[in-house]
Image: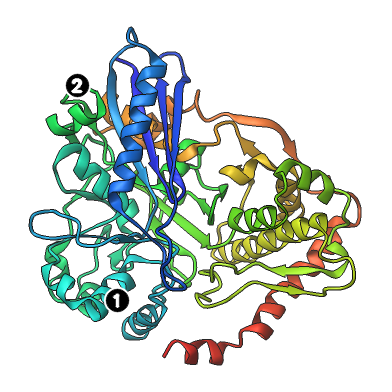
Amino acid sequence: MSRFLGLDVGTQGTKGLLIDLERGEVVARASASYGLIEGLPVGAAEQAPETWWRAVRDVVHALVATAGADAEPIAGIGVSGQQHGFVALDAEREVLRPAKLWCDTSTAKEAQELSDALGRSVPAGFTASKILWMKRYEPERFARLRHVLLPHDWIDLRLTGELWAECGDASGTGFFDGAARDYDRASMEAIDPSLAGWMPTLVAPNAPASTLSTDAAADLGLPAGIPVAPGGGDNMMSAIGSGAVRSGEYVVSLGTSGTVFTHSSDPIESDGLIAPFCDSTGGWLPLLCVMNATGVTEEVRRAFDADVDGLTQAARDVSAGCDGLLFVPYLAGERVPDLPDATGTLLGIRSGSLSPARLFRAALEGTSLNIAWGIERMRALGLEPDAVRVVGGGARNELWCQILAALLDVHVQRSGEPEAAALGAALQAAWVVTAPGGSREQLIELSAPFVAHSGRLIAPDELGGDARPTYRALAERFPREVARLYPADERRASRR
């Protein structure tokens, strides 16, 4: 039995992979798309958890159909999920309200209050502020709250009928002690004295957590009893799926949000903006998350009803720096820097600046500048990149990767598997089934055939002689412009 199923339940859709461990390859893939609930107030971002389950069901059925009736049985299942969401359940484990997601910034005020009370940064995107928000604005629902889950926890509940959590995803709640790999009781008390009793039990990352229930098996068209791995947050699973399980290997994930992470064998001292997450192998995953990545480029594409490949080709003819046009790309607010109420800004607009090609290049540069600024924070913590791997939908854009290479002054390579989170979930399932209680080195060994790189190394100087000095100057200018647009004292006052 060498086939393992990995699911990645994301913000824009669910993706699934079926891997064959003996052959060392992906043998089937499928996806299902969905969106956010429409018509919500500005800053709110919510989804109904049942939407995720319908997508999981559709993806699994498609994978089984692709594999064929004579395919080997599935030996294990792993789940990756979008981080930081808040799934509220009552005593009967029924969903109380739509899940508030990582990109929901309507809880900025509660996040600031928790940050002040705890003496550390609690980003608005984290789960903690969402619970406090519900307590304040939906007291009747809050009175019925008995279980607090993250999105991947809820999918695992649907798969197995059992409640559990794991340290990687749980470390993104805002009330977790990453160094101790356990819940932070003092932080929970600041939200509600009952919260500690509402959290699921933590399980180890290297052993099956449960098995597929009879009800879920019937819904998915699979046999009951298949082992289900602990799973984890999408960033933790992407780290496995892209091979970022050794220090010095950075991964930049360009999805709706942008994330940057690397493996650490020891916990880091957080600066409040670089998250000191646990990973899903027993180590740690220092992580930077920005709210704006492919959402910005997609906004430009939609504005001109254009094709991404065509826009990219046209953007190549625009000089580095866009002739003075600078895009501060905070269309969804921002987490790093901590500006949940920010908006996007175009600076240096002149005649001709608003052409599709120039705006698209400015979007690529603006998002890259914000990511590079965050990576400088990670370097300041002693986390120096030896190489950078790019994953996610944005990784398909070579120009974007070249801009990042020039800005970071490091070689960049795209991952051979664009769905790194789904692959990581499948690989974790293979690890816990074939080597229960096994070491991280065993995971690295079985992952090696799958963690391939795509194409050549992209060098920092590929965009020509003037690109690197131009981007160095922009990297110095960008933080100054953000500080000018959002003075620190005004930012704090706006959240009170």
**Residue at 57% from the left image edge and 29% from the top image edge:** 452
Relative placement, left or right, of 252 versus 126 is right
Residue that carries the numbered disc 2 in the rendered image: 223
Tell me which corner region of the image, top left, top right, bottom left or bottom right, holds residue 392: top right
Packing grade of label 2 (10 A; few <14, some 14-19, many >=20) is: some
Residue that carries the numbered disc 1 in the rendered image: 133
Task: Identify the amino acid type marked 2.
Answer: Pro
- Please report whichever mark, 2 or 1, sits nearer to the chain's N-terminal start: 1
* Quadrant occupied by the C terminus: bottom left
Q: Is residue 131 above or below residue 255?
A: below
Q: Are marks 2 and 1 in contact (CB under 8 Å)?
A: no
Task: Identify the amino acid type marked 1.
Answer: Trp
* Quadrant occupied by the N terminus: top left
Relative placement, left or right, of 261 versus 154 is right
**Residue at 77% from the left image edge and 46% from the top image edge:** 312
Q: How far across and how far down the image is residue 36, in percent? A: 42, 56
How far is mark 2 from mark 1, CA to CA?
41 Å
Q: How far across and how far down the image is residue 394, in percent? A: 62, 46
